[in-house]
Image (tube, grey):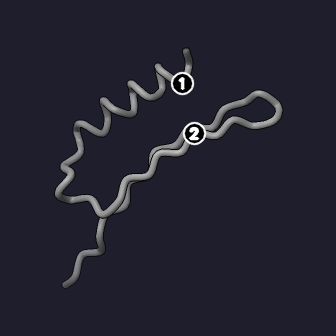
Amino acid sequence: MKNEIILKQAIELLQEVNPNELETVQINNTKYDDGSIGFSVELAYPSKEE
């Protein structure tokens, strides 16, 4: 249940991002031995050439 809530929030945030500006999107969901859960969303933008 918690994963679904977090994933829905991530989707809402990602909808606000212009995909044409992104280089990569990485979503990680990790379950640890102690029962805890890690969830991260990483957005990488290309470097701006001057």
Mark number, residue 43:
none
Residue position marked by numbered label 1 in the rendering:
3
| Quadrant position of the N terminus in the picture | top right
Q: Secondary structure beneath disc 1? A: helix
Q: Position of residue 2 (x, y in %)?
A: 56, 19
Q: Position of residue 4 (x, y in %)?
A: 48, 21
Pick the front one: 21 or 31: 31
The amino acid type, in three-letter code, at marker 1 is Asn
Q: Residue at x 54, y 45 (%)?
A: 28
Residue 44 quadrant: bottom left
Q: In the shown orientation, is residue 39 left or right of residue 36?
A: left
Residue position marked by numbered label 2 in the rendering:
29
Q: Residue at x 81, y 35 (%)?
A: 33
Residues packed near mark 1 inside 10 Å, few (<14), some (14 to 19) or many (20 plus): few
Q: CA distance from mark 1 to mark 2?
A: 9 Å
Tell me: residue 13, above or below residue 23.
above
Q: Secondary structure beneath disc 2? A: strand
Residue 46 quadrant: bottom left
Residue 39 quadrant: top right
Q: Residue at x 21, y 51 (%)?
A: 19
Q: Position of residue 32 (x, y in %)?
A: 75, 37
